[in-house]
Image (tube, rainbow, N blue to C red):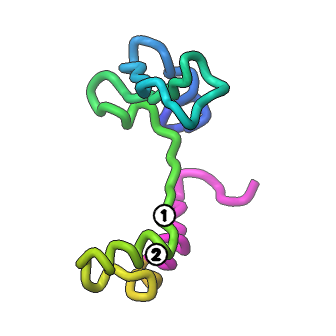
C-alpha cells in the first residue's frame, strides 16, 4: 500500500518492515537529533526498500557532472547530459487508471 499512496510510507518507518538503520554519530551535522545520528529507513522484506517508497527523484548539480568529466568520465559533463536530464523531467506517463484532473 505504501507504493500506491506514497504518504503512507512514513507509517512503515521503525516497524518490522524497516531495518531502522542509523548513521554513526556525526561531528558536524545532525546536531538536533538524538546522539547526532540520522535515521535511514530501509525496507525489510520482499522488495526491500521498495516497501518504503517515497517516489522521490533527485538529480545532481551541474558541478557534479562537470567534476565527473574532469575525473575522466568523458561525455558525462553537464552540457552533454542536460538533454537527458531535461527529458527525465518532462516525462509524463500518467496512465489511464485514474483521471488526471483533480
Q: Residue at x 39, y 29 (%)?
A: 42
Q: Residue at x 39, y 23 (%)?
A: 21
Q: Residue at x 61, y 34 (%)?
A: 7
Between 78 and 14, the one lying in front of the other is 78
Residues tagged 1 and 2 counted as in contact (Cβ below 8 A)? yes
Residue stretch rendered in magenta on the structure: 85-102
Q: Is residue 42 left or right of residue 33?
A: left
Q: Furthest residue to the front?
A: 27
Residue 49 vs 20, above or below: the answer is below
Q: Is residue 86 magenta?
A: yes
Q: Position of residue 25 (x, y in %)?
A: 47, 24
Q: Furthest residue to the top?
A: 16
Distance between the alpha carbons at the discs numbered 1 and 2: 8 Å
Q: Position of residue 60 (x, y in %)?
A: 47, 65
Which numbered disc covers residue 85?
Answer: 2
Residue 68 vs 8, above or below: the answer is below
What is the crowding at mark 2: few (fewer than 14 residues within 10 Å), some, or many (at least 20)?
Answer: few
Which residue is labeled 1 in the image? 59
Earlier in the chain: of badge 1 and badge 2, it is 1
Q: Position of residue 52 (x, y in %)?
A: 45, 32
Q: Residue at x 51, y 24 (%)?
A: 37
Between 55 and 34, the one lying in front of the other is 34
Between 8 and 96, the one lying in front of the other is 8
Amino acid at each position: 500500500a505504501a507504493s500506491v499512496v506514497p504518504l503512507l510510507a512514513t507509517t512503515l518507518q521503525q516497524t518490522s518492515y524497516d531495518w531502522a538503520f542509523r548513521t554513526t554519530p556525526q561531528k558536524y551535522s545532525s546536531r538536533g537529533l538524538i546522539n547526532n545520528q540520522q535515521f535511514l529507513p530501509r525496507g525489510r522484506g520482499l522488495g526491500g526498500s521498495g516497501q518504503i517508497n517515497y517516489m522521490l527523484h533527485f538529480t545532481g548539480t551541474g558541478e557534479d557532472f562537470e567534476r565527473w568529466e574532469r575525473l575522466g568520465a568523458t561525455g558525462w559533463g553537464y552540457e552533454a547530459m542536460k538533454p537527458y536530464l531535461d527529458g527525465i523531467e518532462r516525462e509524463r506517463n500518467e496512465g489511464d487508471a485514474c483521471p488526471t484532473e483533480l
